[in-house]
Every structure is written in structure tokens, then in C-alpha cells.
Image (cartoon, rainbow, N blue to C red):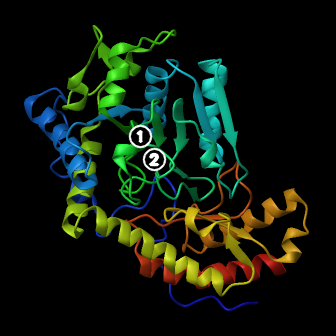
Amino acid sequence: MTPKPTQRPQSPNFSSGPCSKRPGWSIQALSNALTGRSHRSKPGKARIKDVIDSTKKVLGIPDDYFCGIVPASDTGAVEIAMWSLLGERGLDILAWESFGKGWVTDVQKQLKLSDCRVMEADYGHLPDLSQVDCSRDVVFTWNGTTAGVKVPNGDWIPDDREGLTIADATSATFAMDIPWSKLDAVTWSWQKVMGGEAAHGMLVLSPRAVARLESYTPAWPLPKIFRLTKGGKLIKGIFEGATINTPSMICVEDALDGLKWAESLGGLPALIQRSEANLDAIATWVTQTPWVDFLAVETATRSNTSICLKIVDPWYTDLSADHQAQKAKQMATLLDTEGVAYDIASYRDAPPGLRIWGGATVETQDLHALLPWLDWAYAEMKTA
């Protein structure tokens, strides 16, 4: 039997969503929440507007871009963008992991777009970005949460594009450099990099996206919570604190707490640096550990938030697919039982392995403490 490591992570929360709270967080951070007050009251709207303004400040979102809070987490934000903006021209949609494939299903089976090119790649890879036609609309995930594969940059998107670019950036925003001028609709949720509470999404629109909204009416009916225009004009109140539906003021307070923490660190550069340090810690270990590798094939596309690992030991790869999944799950269960890592099994649709969150709210020292436990759990799983 392999001896257990003696050091444990101070926080075993390595889930990829909802993600770990910021270091030092406690329920006291919510003590000033406007509970029992209307979100449409003057102080309620002001608190929501604070979230929007602080978000734009930390992320460096251009002044002429609109930033708003929408219902149903990142999923709701992506759906609002697709149902409101798509259909005016042909679409190129990219998919290389579970959520991207979900957006493909939506445009094909729900919106039923006739002119839709699907560009897919297997887990661990990106589609050929050079083949994307930005004279058409483009939908893609900036960071594939279930594959640990991100686009390396926005250089493949021309500044003089004719179509709109819609990016699901839920596990990228606040941890990666987002080139706003390359994007027209960007979405994420509070529960990812900032470790906020779930159920609320964010939607950012460029002036080009607003122009599309005000000049184009989709062929399909839009549910009330998807509607961004009235009388052919953008409902600006959505982006000024008058949200589409009722937000939780407790969640609003928590989002504000996270943004204040981010600013106290030094803003976006500090958040990115913390996340990249987490990836570096795991990368160093991977180079020294023969039984494991990154699911992402190319170093440049390796996610620094949803860090996906695969087992490459020949004895394991020779097992049947079902037996591989069983063994990988057994390993994650061992770590959970020991209380050193919660919720790090790979996503249900992804290849079996481990998925460790490396966003800014995770302390690098906790990852250093976790890595010997991964070796221990692997040895235990292999001999079981």
C-alpha cells in the first residue's frame, strides 16, 4: 500500500462549476445584501449597476459595449445571444467539447438554420480556425470547459469582419485575455472564475451586435426573457440595472464581493497571473509524471482554468472504454473520500480522466498539496 501524503490542501474545492470561493470568503461577505428589498428599488438598482460597472472596469470592456445581467447562468446568456442575433446570414459554428456541441444542437434542431457550417474537432483538439469564414456569423466557446482546450488568441478573427462573433467565454472571462474588439457577443456566469453564486449570466454586446438587434427581426418567436429590444430599439435598461427578471440580491452582493477582491489584487492582470500559476504548477508535475498527460494536445491551446488530464499508462489505455471510465471514477472517489479534492472527475460526456479547476480563486499552494495525492490515488486505483 502506498503511504498517504501528509499535507492536505486547505481548500479541497477544485470543482469546475460552481467554482471555489475567493480565499478568505465567509458568509459575512453577504451581510450587507439587500434581502427583502425590491431589485427595482433605488438602492437595489444601484447595487446591480455597481456589479455591471465594476465588471466593465475589471475586464476593460470598452465604453461603447453594453454589459448586462441575464437569467439562467451562461446557458441563458448564450441562448439569448443566439436566438436574438442569428439568422440574418449564414453561420459557422465551432465545437470541440460538450457545450459547444450543445450549441450546435440548438442551431440545427431548434433554430433550424438552413445555412449552417459545423466545424468540429475531437476532444483535445481545436477545429482549423483558418477555415472559419467571418463574413458569416460565428459561434464558439473561447475555452472548452469539458475538454480543457481554449482558442489561443483572437488573431484568426479579422477586424473588418462582416458577420458577428458570439463567444461563450464562461470559463475564460477573468482568467484569460479577451480581445473585446474581436467579439460582438460575449457570455459568462458568476459561478466560474470569480467563484460567485450560480443562476445569473452576463451578456456583453458590441455596437455591431446592437446594430444587428435594431435592424433585424428573427423569423422565430422570442420568449420574454430573451427579448433585448422594444419597438426596434435596444432595451438599454437591461444594461443599466433593470434586469430582464428578478435577480437574487444575495448573489448580487456575492458578485460585488468577488469584484472588490479582484480589484484589491490588482485587477485582471493579477487574476490571469494567479490562474496561469495554477496551470504552471500542474504542468510541471505532468512533465515529471509518466502516467498522466493533458487532454489538450497543443500547449498553446491548454486551458489555465478547466485543466483536463488523461491517464496514459499503457496498462490503463489497454483497458476497455467502460473499464477506463470505472477506474478514473474510482480515482476521483478516493480523493473525494479523503477530503482532498472534490468534484474533479471528468465531465460525463468527456473522455475519462480528471478535471481540476485552476481559476483565480484557487490557491496555487493548494494545488501543490494536491498533486502528491493524485499520485497516491493513482497507485491505489491501479492496484485495486
Image position of 377 with respect to 154: above or below: below
Q: Secondary structure at mark 2?
A: loop
Q: Secondary structure at mark 1?
A: strand
Q: Is residue 274 left or right of residue 303?
A: left
- Image height of 293 relative to 256, above or below: below
| Residue 122 as seen in the image, left or right of residue 99 | right
Q: Residue at x 28, y 69 (%)?
A: 24
Residue at 49% across, 28% down:
79
Q: What residue is shown with label 2?
A: 169
Could you say which is closer to the camera, residue 161 or residue 92? 161
The answer, for residue 10, to whether it is visible in the render is: no
Q: From the viewer's perspective, is 283 left or right of 239?
A: right
Q: Quadrant of residue 265?
A: bottom left
Q: Residue at x 9, y 35 (%)?
A: 43
Assess disc 1: are there few (<14), some (14-19) or many (≥20) residues with their C-alpha within 10 Å of its C-alpha. many
Relative image position of residue 4 (x, y in whole percent): 63, 88
> Dividing the image into 4 quarters, which one contains the C terminus?
bottom right
Are the residues tagged 1 and 2 within 8 Å (C-beta)? yes
Q: Which residue is mark 1?
A: 187
Residue 227 drawn above or below residue 221: below
Badge 2 amino acid: Ala
- Across and down, in percent, residue 166 comes to 46, 36
